[in-house]
Amino acid sequence: MLMQNVDLKNKIILITGAAGFVGSNLVMELLKTVNPVHIIGLDNMNDYYDVSIKNYRLNEIDNLAKECHESTWTFIKGNIADKELIFKIFKENSPAVVVNLAAQAGVRYSITNPDVYVESNLIGFYNILEACRNFPVEHLVYASSSSVYGSNKKIPYSTDDKVDNPVSLYAATKKSNELLAHAYSKLYNIPSTGLRFFTVYGPAGRPDMAYFGFTNKLIKGEKIQIFNFGNCKRDFTYVDDIVEGVKRVMQHAPEKVTGEDGLPIPPYKVYNIGNNSPENLLDFVDILQQELVRAGVLPEDYDFEAHKELVPMQAGDVPITFADTSSLEADFGFKPSTSLRDGIRNFAEWYKEFYMA
Ligand SMILES: NC(=O)c1ccc[n+]([C@@H]2O[C@H](COP(=O)([O-])OP(=O)(O)OC[C@H]3O[C@@H](n4cnc5c(N)ncnc54)[C@H](O)[C@@H]3O)[C@@H](O)[C@H]2O)c1
């Protein structure tokens, strides 16, 4: 196990994408467990999906922050692609730790809307790196994605695998983030850790993802499309596990070491955070059905068979994702463990409360 070398206590932490699914959960976890802590959340509140969910998450954070008397929570609405704004935030606050979660997510959307991926994921991330260069940080942690593995044949996916064959622009931007971070770590000795998240799900999650989109459709009586005729496996990872992983990683920055050439060996690391246990799409749909009925989101006599359609593979999709989490376990003593059943149950209960109470 690695020793912690970044103490989050009393530090200023900048979290971009703070109104997002992972970001909001991370802010809440830090407020609950680090005392005192000073968090600045940045998010442009874009309408890629229902903004009321982002507002709901911010509201949850505000309520929690009111109870954390010694900590501070500041929200800034803004775009990471706005270099002037980013520099202003860094100059005025000198964050010790930066967690960059702001990005345009979604594989399929990147096929029809490439511009926003270049703006948020490339220009935006470059601005964060430049800011870290000009206003040094103890640790930059950023979200990469399991999509960098493309259609890797070898499973489980290891961070030692070659990932030069992205199959979507989204994946290409995430891989680019890792490359840019490597160069900046080498050139400017910026300790950085990239995290390849695997299909994150949970309460107040993203409506563009299958479990949420399927639920919306089933409620409306529409058919759900199950890609690759159901022959897909996904390493579904519960949001609390992702957040626990991010929090642990934040507390250990890759060491700054000088190489034989007198130049820094890049303080650079990349980890997978995934469940290490892929589930078949049809089994996942079964569990979702059962839990939606259990939570009272759908009636017991709902005719699921009539609302399922098995369709071919979509462009940009991959048949399986499967995380090798051995280095996360070795370095941080942690691996995700929430079962799909438990996680989907929490989602279904939240959905009922949020939309139907
Ligand atoms: N959820 C997953 O399954 C998953 C898997 C792999 C990687 N990731 C990555 O993890 C990170 C968090 O994902 P998430 O699921 O919470 O997504 P999310 O869309 O819920 O959160 C991202 C947030 O960033 C904000 N944002 C987008 N572009 C911005 C910009 N230019 N400036 C400021 N804010 C901006 C959005 O408004 C959103 O609230 C993203 O980088 C995503 O690519 C997520």
Image (tube, rainbow, N blue to C red):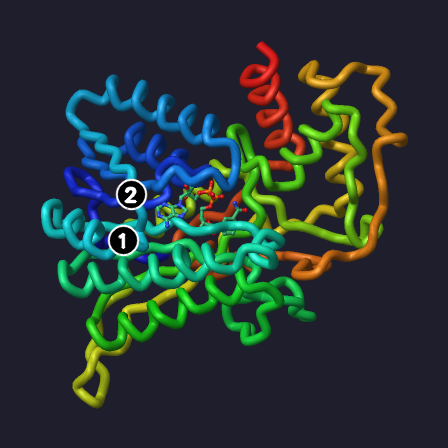
Residue at 55% in and 58% down:
146
Question: Which residue, as the protein is rendered here, is positioned at the far top?
Answer: 357
Q: Quadrant of residue 214?
A: top right
Residue at 52% in and 60% down:
114
Mark 2 vs ligand 1: CB under 8 Å? yes
**Nearest the camera: 49 or 241?**
49
Mark 1 vs ligand 1: CB under 8 Å? yes
Q: Secondary structure at mark 2?
A: loop
Tag 2: Cα neighbours inside 10 Å, few (<14), some, or many (≥20)? Answer: some
Q: Quadrant of residue 66?
A: top left
Task: Report the label total.
Answer: 2
> Marks 1 and 2: in contact by CB < 8 Å?
yes
Residue at 47% in and 67% down:
175
Residue 163 at x, y percent in the picture: 54, 72
For the N terminus, the image quarter is: bottom left
**Nearest the camera: 112 or 59?**
112
Disc ID at residue 78:
2
Q: Secondary structure at mark 1?
A: loop
Q: What residue did someone put label 1 on?
A: 82
- Would residue 71 be found to the left or right of residue 309 on screen? left
Residue 285 at x, y percent in the picture: 76, 36
- Would residue 297 be found to the left or right of residue 260 on screen? right
Residue type beneath disc 2:
Gly
- Would residue 210 be found to the left or right of residue 50 on screen? right
Disc ID at residue 92:
none
Residue type beneath disc 1:
Asp
